[in-house]
Image (cartoon, grey):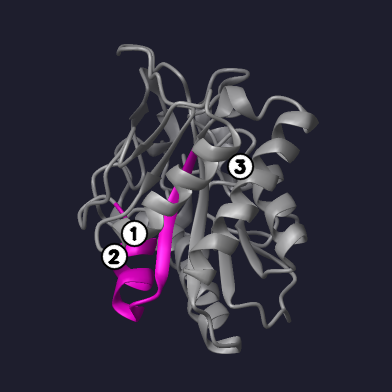
């Protein structure tokens, strides 16, 4: 792919801004984040050369996560930071330069627009998409005292090659295992039928994660990365069910 971004800015007038705030002025003790909310691709990148419909799959965004995050924010009157661009452009929950930050292949789908990128093209994606979200997170903590922060994600039940994931939700952390346990306990009381886990289907790692290692852990606040299986979020009723369950659990984390 021709390295167009070496000649002009990546984002143009009609491209969306990278960050959207919800309840920006809220002084809630809870800060919410959704790094994989959006599917936007800068017009200059020509849809990354993806096949038709690929951007709507789980590789392009966290399906249902934005609606879930908005509903939780409304219930808690909490500030929420949404990232508008597809994680195939740049994954804003991975350290810049990390493997998978700008994937050439995602779940067996080739991303032509990410192949053989030059350093300037990478730098512009980092500067114009990753950096504004990172700055917004810092601002979110600076605007009011926060005692907790939670990142809202979804995962797919089964990747192209791999075993079917049995969990309905997972709660990821390293230093605040107590918060993850509150989520499991609270949701299990309300819905004993759910299959829940701590640190499934992923684990937090310095090399592969950003928000928890670089923002939540250094501040010593209550935190967790929340992963809900996207088959639980296919309807408005499902989204509202999970928003209620998670808002209740967040309340219990804060009161503990």
Q: Position of residue 211 (x, y in %)?
A: 39, 62
Query: In which quarter of the view is residue 251 placed?
Result: bottom right
Relative horizontal placement of residue 153, taking residue 239 as reference (left or right) = left
Which comes before the other along the chain, label 2 or label 3? 3
Q: Which residue is mark 2?
A: 213
Q: Which residue is mark 3?
A: 65
Between the C-alphas of marks 2 and 3, the distance is 21 Å
In this view, 140 is above or below 39? below
Measuring 60% from the left and 43% from the top, which residue is drawn there? 41
Query: In which quarter of the view is residue 100 placed?
Result: top left
Q: Which residues are magenta?
A: 209-227
| Numbered disc 1: secondary structure | helix
Q: Which residue is mark 1?
A: 178
Specify the label residue 225 is tagged with. Answer: none
Between the C-alphas of marks 1 and 2, the distance is 17 Å
Measuring 52% from the left and 47% from the top, which residue is drawn there? 186
Relative horizontal placement of residue 193, taking residue 240 as reference (left or right) = left
Q: Position of residue 122 (x, y in %)?
A: 36, 55
Q: Could you classify mark 2 by the number of other residues whose Cα lies within 10 Å: few (under 14), some (14-19), or many (20 or more)?
A: some
Q: Could you classify mark 3 by the number of other residues whose Cα lies within 10 Å: few (under 14), some (14-19), or many (20 or more)?
A: many
Between the C-alphas of marks 1 and 3, the distance is 24 Å
């Amino acid at each position: 792919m021709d390295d167009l971004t070496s000649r002009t800015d990546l984002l143009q007038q009609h491209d969306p801004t990278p960050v959207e705030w919800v309840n920006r002025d809220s002084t809630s003790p809870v800060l919410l984040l959704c790094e994989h909310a959006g599917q936007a691709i800068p017009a200059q990148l020509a849809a990354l050369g993806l096949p038709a419909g690929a951007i709507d799959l789980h590789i392009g965004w966290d399906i249902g996560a934005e609606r879930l995050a908005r509903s939780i924010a409304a219930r808690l009157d909490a500030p929420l930071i949404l990232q508008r661009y597809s994680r195939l452009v740049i994954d804003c929950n991975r350290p810049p330069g990390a493997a998978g930050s700008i994937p050439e292949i995602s779940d067996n789908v080739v991303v032509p627009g990410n192949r053989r990128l030059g350093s300037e093209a990478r730098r512009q994606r980092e500067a114009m998409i990753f950096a504004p979200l990172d700055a917004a997170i810092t601002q979110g903590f600076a605007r009011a005292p926060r005692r907790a922060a939670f990142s809202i994600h979804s995962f797919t039940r089964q990747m192209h090659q791999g075993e079917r994931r049995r969990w309905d939700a997972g709660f990821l952390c390293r230093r605040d295992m107590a918060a993850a346990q509150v989520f499991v306990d609270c949701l299990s009381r309300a819905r004993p039928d759910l299959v829940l886990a701590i640190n499934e289907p992923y684990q937090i790692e310095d090399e592969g994660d950003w928000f928890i290692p670089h923002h939540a852990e250094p501040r010593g606040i209550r935190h967790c990365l929340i992963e809900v299986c996207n088959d639980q979020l296919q309807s408005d009723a499902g989204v509202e069910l999970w928003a209620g369950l998670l808002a209740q659990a967040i309340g219990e984390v804060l009161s503990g």
